[in-house]
Image (cartoon, coloured by chain):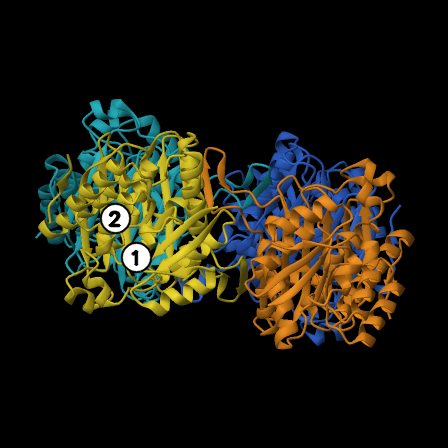
Chain colours: A cyan, B orange, C yellow, D blue
C-alpha cells in the first residue's frame, strides 16, 4: 500500500487524509502542520504520526507527498519533494505567479517524479461523466460552454487579501474545468467583468466578489463563466455544454430527494452549503485516480501543465479586469 | 360549419361553448338553461340565441346537441336528442344508474345518431400522448397503472348529496382513464377503501372524501387509484404506467416554469387550482375530436359504451365500500 | 371594440391577427400585404377586408395600426400612422439604424399617439412572472442575469443577409429582456464574442451563428447572454437571475409532461421547435397589454424608447465583434 | 470501540461488515459463514478473524452479534445470542412465522438484551428526512401513503421458492415503511392483488412477481403499495404522503445529475440498478443508529416488535391473495 506524507492539516488536508485512509489502497504515514495540535489531531484520526515537513519529505517510508499547505509554500515544497524523489499531489495552485510555476515544473520534470494537481472538480462523478460523454461525441462538437459557480459565503477577508483575487482563487477551478471540457482546444481571448456586490469589505481588500468571464478558443468555441462569493441557496455548481448535436448539462446535487408541495408551490430540498460535502465523492475519486496514475501509469487527470494553463487564464482575467480591455493569449 | 345547441349554461357549459366558438370549425346556435340569465349571458359571449330545451332539440338549424345540464337529466335529454336525429356530446355520466344507461344507449343505437361522452381527460394533451406512446409499445405491455387525482377542494355539500358519491362523481374519471389506458383488457376485480378525513360534513352527507381503489383485469393487470377531495397544493392529476419495457408517466402541469432558490430550497411554481384552467386544452381538443368523429368518421374517443363501463366500475367500488368486500365483475 | 388595421400578412402578421380576433376585445378591420393572396387568405380567417397600406392608415374605421411588414419599412410606416393619429403596435425593430429610430420616435412624440414595440417575450407568462417576482424583491437586488436563447435552426441566408446580423436580429430580444429585468439600471459596458459554427453559408453572408455577449450596468450588475442559431433539441429559452437573497429562473416549457423511464434513463418530452408555438401565450398577452395601454392608460410594457435602447445595445455588440474591443456606452 | 461478531458473509454480510469497519466507532472481531472461503475473504477486508457461529456467540471479546445468515436461521441465532447476553442486529425477517417471532422476542425480552431489526430503508437519508418532516407536522396529518418499490430483476427462482413469497420477502420492507410513516396508527384492513407478469418460472414456484396491496388504519388512513420484481429502468424506490396540509415525497436517486437534450427530448441519468449502491448511505446510517441505540440509549428505529408487525401484514397480504378476500387484523 502506498504511503503518504501529508503537509498541512487544515480543512483540505483533513479531507485528503480521510480519503486516503478510507481508500483501502493507501495509508497516511506522517502529517505535518504549522500548528502541531492540528497535525496531532488528524494523525490520531488516520493512524499516522506527526513529523516536521523536512523529515516527512526525507522519510524513506513515504512514497508520496500530499501538499495542502498555504498557497505561497506550494512551489517550494513541490521542488523539495521532487528532489527527494517523491510522487506529489499538490492542491491548486502551484503558485500565484506563472513564472514561478514554470520554474517549479522544470524542477519536477528534471527530477522525473509524478505530479498531479488537486483540481478536485475533474473527479466529481457528475462532471467527469459529462466530460466522458462529451468526449464520446454524444453532442458532437462543443460550441458554447457555460460554467456556473457560486459559493454560499466568502472566506474571511484576511484570506482574500492573500488569495490573489477571485479569478486566481475561485474562478481558477472554472478555468480548469473549461480546459478539461475543451479537450485541447486552448483559449486565446479573455474578457472579464467584476464587481463588489456582496460585501464592501471585499472591495476594500482590493478584490471583487461577483464576476463574469467570457473567452474564446483558437477554433472559435465560446466559454462563459459566472462566479459569486455569496449564494443564499448554497454551493451552486453547474456545467452546460451546447454542442452541434445536443446539450449536456450537470445540475446541482440536492441534499435529499424529498419534495414538499403546498400552497406555496413545490419545494425541492436544499443543495449543499459545504464544499466538503458537495465534493466528498470527488475527493475520494481524486485519491484513487492519483493511485491509478502512480500504480497503473494512467495519465494524471490534471497535470502540472494544467495547473500552469489555468493560472495563465486567471492572470489574463485579472489583467482584463484591471485594464478593462480584452486580453489575447498567444 | 357544424351548428351546436347547448343545454346548460353553467360552468361546464361555458367551457364548452367557448371552445366551440373558438374552434373555427363550429358555431353555437342556441343555448338553454333553467336560469334564463345564465343562458342569455353565455349567448352574448358566443354570439348565440337563447331558446327552450325542447325548441333547441327540435331546431332544424341545430346539428348537434351538447348536454351540460345536471346529471339526472342527461339520459332523458340524450334520448330526446337521439329521437330528433341530432349528434350528441354529453357530459359524464349518462346516468347514476347502470340500467338507465343501458336503456338510453339502446335508444341512441336505434336512432343511429352519433354519441360521444365528455370524459375530457382522454383529450388532455399529456394523457393522450401517454396513451399514444403506450399503444405504440414504447413500454411493452402495461402491468401496473397508477392514477392520482386530488382536487383542491370539495364541491358544496348540497352537490355532494346528489352526486352519487365520490366513486360515481369524482373517481369515475379515473375509472374511465384506466379503461382508456388498458385498451380493451376489462377490469374484473374491484376493491375500494374510503374515509372521511377532510370535512365531517361530507360524512354526514353519506359520502367519503378520501379513497383508494385497486382493481385487476381479466389478464391480471393491476390498476391503483387514489382520490382526495382536498389538496392544499392544487389540482393533482398524475398517471403512471409500469410496463414490461419501461415506465411512462404524465406529471402535473405547473402554472409557470419559474423557480425560486433560496435558503428554504428550490421552489417550483404552483399547479392549477381550477379544473377549467388545468383542462383548458383538453376541452378544446375534445370539441375538435367530436367534430372529427362527425365529419371524418373517426371513432369517438369515449363512446356511450365507455360511459356505461365506467359507471359499472363506480357501482362496483361503491358496493365494495359498503360491503367491505371484494367485488367481482362478470 | 378597438379596430385594427394590419400591415403585413406573413407569419408574424398571422399570429397577431389571430390573437386580435380571439381576444374578445378587438377586431381586425383591414389587412394589407405586398402579396395580395396572403392578405386575402388571412382576411378570410379573421373576417377582415383587404386594402392598400395607404388606405388602411387613412381609414376612419381603424383605431390602431399593427405593423408586421419587413424591417426596412417599419420607421416609415410608424411615421405615417402617427401622422394619421393612429395608435401603433410595431414589430421589433423600429429600424436597424439608431439615428432613424430617434427621428421616428420624435415624429411619434409630436403626433402624441400611443406606440408599443412588439418585444413579445416581455409578455411570456413565465418571463413576466419572473420579472414580477424580481420587482417584488423576492431575491433582493439582481446581481447576475443569464439569458440563454437558442433557435432550432437558422432563417434562410437570404433573410440573414438583410437582417443586420445576429445581434440586431436575434439577440435584440435578449438585450430587451435584460433591460426589462434590470428595471432602469442601464448597461454601459458591452463585449461580444461570436463565430460561425453551424453553417459556413452564414459566414459567407457576413454574419455569425453563435454568440456570447456580456455586459455591465452603471451600478455594476452583470448580464450574460448566449445565442445559437441551431439547437437540435428545440427552441431553448431560459432566464436566470442571481440576486442578493436568492435565485429566480424560468426554465424551458416542454411539449407535454410525459416522461419515459427505461434502460437509457428518464426522458422528458421535447421542447417546442416553433417560436409561434413557444410564444403563443405571449402573443395573446401582448395584444391584451396593448389594449390595456390604450383603454386603461397602463404604461406600455415595451415603449419606443425601449426599442431604441435595445438597438443601441445591438449596435454596441456589433461594433465590439468587429473591433474585438470592449464598447463603452455613455 | 464496540466489537461485532458477524454471522453470514454473503452480500448483505459484506455490506454490514464494511459499514462497521468504516464507521470509526466499531470494529469487526469475528466472521462466520457456512462457506469458509467467504468468511475468510471478508475477514481479510475488515481485519477480522474467522470462527464458528458458536464460538463467536460465546466469545468474551464480542459485544454485538450481527445476523446476516439465511432467514430460517435468524430466530435460533437471535435466541442463542440473547442467552449469551449479546446485543443483536438482525437482518429482516426474524422468521417467516409470526408465532416463531413471538417466541423469539420473548426470549430476547427475558434476556434483557438490545435487539434491532435491519429494516435498512428507515435509515435512508431521503426516507428518514421525509419521516422527520412528516412527524414535525409539515403536512399536517397523513391521509394517503403511496409506496412504490420495483426491483430491476428477480432473485433466482431457487431463492424465491424458499422466500415465503413476494409479500414476505419483498413487500415486507414496504409494510415496515408504512408503519414507520404512520407513527403508531396500526393497520387493520388489508387487501392484496398479485399476478405473474414478468417470468412464468416465478409462477411455477408458487409465487407472484407483480403486486398491489392497499390497507387502512384504525383511524382510516390509507396506504397503497405496489411492487414489481422487474423494472427495466432500475431500482425504483419512492414514497409519497398526502396530508391535510400538503404533500411530501421522496423521489428516486439518479446515478448522476447529468442530463442530455437532443431531438429525442431531455434525458436524465439512470437510477441505480443495485440495492447495495442505492442504499449505501442507509446501511452506513443503520450501523450508526445501532451504536447510538447501544451507547446513547436512543430507541432503536426498528425494534423486534416492528419486525413482528411487518410480518403480520405480510401474512395478511398472503392470506388475502390466497383467499381473494379482504383480511381484517385485530
- The chain identifier of the residue carrying mark 2 reads C
Task: Answer with mark 2 or mark 1, whichever residue precedes in sequence.
Answer: 1
- The residue under the point 62% across, 63% down is B287
| Distance from Cα at disc 2 to Cα at disc 1 | 10 Å
Residue B127 falls in which quadrant of the image? Answer: bottom right
Badge 1 density bin: few <14, some 14–19, many ≥20, Cα 10 Å: many
Residue C213 location, x and y as percent? 22, 47
Task: Choose between A285 and A138: the one closer to the eye.
Answer: A138
Task: Choose between D36 and C216: the one closer to the eye.
Answer: C216
Residue farthest along the front direction in this orientation: C60
- Provide the secondary structure element on which disc 2 rests: helix
Residue A90 location, x and y as percent? 24, 44
Residue where numbered disc 1 is placed: C53
- The residue under the point 58% across, 74% down is B136
Regarding residue A291, the answer to whether it shows in the image is no
> What's the mark number on residue B81?
none
In the displayed structure image, the side of residue D117 where residue C91 appears, left or right: left
- Provide the secondary structure element on which disc 1 rests: helix
> What's the mark number on residue C80?
2
Task: Choose between A241 and A107: the one closer to the eye.
Answer: A241
Regarding residue D277, the answer to whether it shows in the image is yes
Badge 2 density bin: few <14, some 14–19, many ≥20, Cα 10 Å: some
Residue D249 location, x and y as percent? 61, 46
In the displayed structure image, the side of residue D105 where residue D32 appears, left or right: left
Residue D300 falls in which quadrant of the image? Answer: top right
- The chain identifier of the residue carrying mark 1 reads C
Task: Choose between C328 and D7: the one closer to the eye.
Answer: C328
Residue B148 location, x and y as percent? 67, 53
Amino acid at each position: 500500500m502506498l504511503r503518504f506524507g501529508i503537509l498541512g492539516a487544515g480543512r483540505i488536508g483533513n479531507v485528503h487524509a480521510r480519503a486516503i485512509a478510507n481508500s483501502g489502497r493507501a495509508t497516511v504515514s506522517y502529517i505535518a502542520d504549522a500548528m502541531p495540535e492540528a497535525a496531532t489531531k488528524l494523525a490520531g484520526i488516520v493512524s499516522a504520526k506527526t513529523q516536521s515537513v523536512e523529515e516527512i519529505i526525507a522519510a524513506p517510508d513515504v512514497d508520496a507527498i500530499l501538499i495542502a499547505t498555504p498557497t505561497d509554500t506550494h512551489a517550494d515544497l513541490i521542488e523539495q519533494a521532487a528532489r527527494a524523489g517523491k510522487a506529489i499531489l499538490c492542491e491548486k495552485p502551484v503558485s500565484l505567479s506563472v513564472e514561478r510555476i514554470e520554474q517549479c515544473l522544470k524542477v519536477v520534470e528534471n527530477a522525473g517524479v509524478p505530479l498531479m494537481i488537486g483540481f478536485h472538480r475533474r473527479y466529481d462523478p457528475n462532471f467527469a461523466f459529462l466530460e466522458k460523454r462529451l468526449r464520446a461525441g454524444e453532442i458532437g462538437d462543443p460550441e458554447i460552454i457555460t460554467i456556473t459557480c457560486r459559493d454560499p459565503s466568502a472566506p474571511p477577508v484576511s484570506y482574500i487579501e492573500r488569495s490573489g483575487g477571485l479569478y486566481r482563487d475561485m474562478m481558477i477551478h472554472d478555468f480548469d474545468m473549461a480546459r478539461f471540457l475543451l479537450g485541447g482546444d486552448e483559449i486565446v481571448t479573455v474578457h472579464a467583468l467584476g464587481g463588489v456586490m456582496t460585501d464592501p469589505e471585499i472591495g476594500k481588500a482590493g478584490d471583487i466578489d461577483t464576476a463574469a468571464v467570457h473567452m474564446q478558443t483558437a477554433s472559435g468555441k465560446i466559454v462563459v463563466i459566472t462566479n459569486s462569493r455569496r449564494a443564499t441557496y448554497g454551493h451552486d455548481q453547474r456545467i452546460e455544454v451546447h454542442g452541434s448535436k445536443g446539450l449536456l448539462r450537470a445540475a446541482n446535487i440536492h441534499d435529499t430527494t424529498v419534495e414538499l408541495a403546498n400552497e406555496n408551490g413545490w419545494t425541492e430540498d436544499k443543495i449543499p452549503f459545504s464544499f466538503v460535502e458537495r465534493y466528498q465523492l470527488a475527493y475520494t475519486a481524486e485519491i484513487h485516480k492519483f493511485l491509478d496514475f502512480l500504480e497503473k501509469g494512467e495519465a494524471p487527470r490534471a497535470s502540472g501543465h494544467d495547473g500552469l494553463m489555468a493560472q495563465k487564464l486567471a492572470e489574463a482575467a485579472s489583467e482584463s479586469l484591471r485594464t478593462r480591455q480584452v486580453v489575447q493569449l498567444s
